[in-house]
Amino acid sequence: MGLNIKRTFQQLAMGLAVAAIVGCNGGGDTPKPEDGKTTKPTGGGTAAAAIDGKIPVGLVASQNGELKPWGEDCVKGAQLAVEEYNKSATDPNLTVKLVVSDSGSKPEQGKSAAQNLVSSEKVVVLLGEVSSGITAQMGSVAIENNIPLIAVGATRTDLTKDKPLISRVCYTDAFQGPVMAKFAFEELNLRKIGLVTDKKQPYSTGLSDSFRAYFLKLGGEIVDEQFYQSGDTQFSGQITQLKAKNPDGLFMSGYFTETGPIARQAAEAGLKVKMMGGDGWDSSEILTNGGEAILGSFFCNHYNNEENRPEVKEFLDKWKTKFGGAPATTMGALGYDAARLACDAIKRAGSGDSKKIQEMIQATVDFKGVSGSITLKDRKGDPPKRALVVRLEKTGQKFAKAYEYDEKTGLPK
């Protein structure tokens, strides 16, 4: 919704009152959030109302609820990045205060959390979420208030479409679906796949669609698709239907909360096939709820603690020093990358003005993230990222294969 006259005067008055610490805030209108679109920011966004003399950056994360493993790592990664940035900052006026709000693993609560960060905490950048459904709700808040949003692990392809205020540090489902289709067809020699899709999650439906399209293009066959909803615990009906179609593999595009139990129940029913999934499998909990049945399965991921890259080793050393051990999920690395990118954009902008920060985010070229190089210039919010395929073993995730992004086709190579 656009800024009304009263609100504009209030913001101008506030700007005069705290001119020493507040950046300029233009009064341009933004499209209504229901339009789902915006153009290049014209209003300047939220001003930098300093907290303890620092520029406020907001993070929405699942600190409670079923997605808590991701939220916990995301928060830690962002905290590590901000602490590191502030220690190295040469201009105290450009230091950052990270303000975290809980989505409770729910889209509606995620939207409320984002609204609170903008209205009460006056954040100039939003970070989050991991879930695409929650991030979509945050996006409407970013658009309404004309401030940038950097998604941490939300891979749903259309999240950034015609929304230049929204960008991400992860790959999209348009890439990871073909990655897993290519791996299934060429590395596992699978030809008949059954799809298992969470119809409540836009992430899952989009990922199943992208897998299907490329697997068919490669010459494979989708023998069946069965649906469930987040929160379901019994899958016997779907498994019976799949078993009757005699697939040689299953692609389960949902979250670890359900895909583990699906794998366990499929094995108990005698459906013993190769199982695969996307980054929604990324949690050690899948080893518990999937048991022996999930071992030997493969899924797509953004990062792996065992990667032999200097950036990874340095990151893990910092993590161990601050928190002990290593991140339990990839979202530690992606949360770190998202927060570092936001801080870097603030540094390049030379201010806490949202419009300038957004311009710097959009101008990002070859930012050295722990999860890989991030380029957003001329990418419409979607960086061309490499993807990893990992194998689930008792001891955790083991690297299997990496796929690079082909600039000509947008597909894995």
Image (tube, helix red, strand yellow):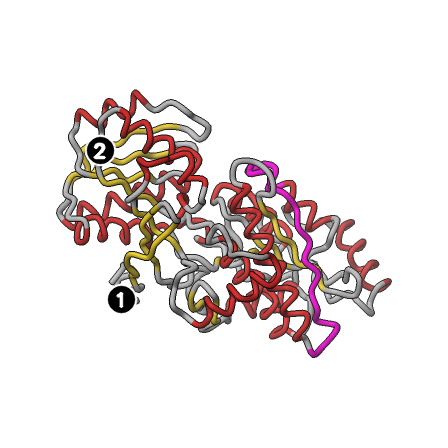
- Tell me which residue sits at (58%, 51%) in the image: 143
Q: CA distance from mark 1 to mark 2?
A: 38 Å
- Tell me which residue sits at (86%, 62%) in the image: 17
| Residue 25 in view of the camera | no
- Please tell me in which quadrant of the rendered image residue 127 appears: bottom right
In the image, what residue type sits under mark 2? Lys
Give the crowd class for mark 2: few <14, some 14-19, many >=20 residues within 10 Å. Answer: some
- Please tell me in which quadrant of the rendered image residue 242 appears: top left
Q: Which mark is residue 251?
A: none
**Where is 260 relative to 386, above or below?**
above
Placement of the C terminus among the 4 image quadrants: bottom left
- Where disc 1 sits, the SS reads loop
Magenta stretch, residue numbers: 90-111
Circles 1 and 2: CB atoms closer than 8 Å: no
Per the image, is 34 magenta? no
* Residue 61 place in picture, x, y as percent: 58, 47
Can you identify the residue that label 2 sits on?
A: 272
Can you identify the residue that label 1 sits on?
A: 408
Give the crowd class for mark 1: few <14, some 14-19, many >=20 residues within 10 Å. Answer: few
Q: Earlier in the sequence, mark 1 or mark 2?
A: 2
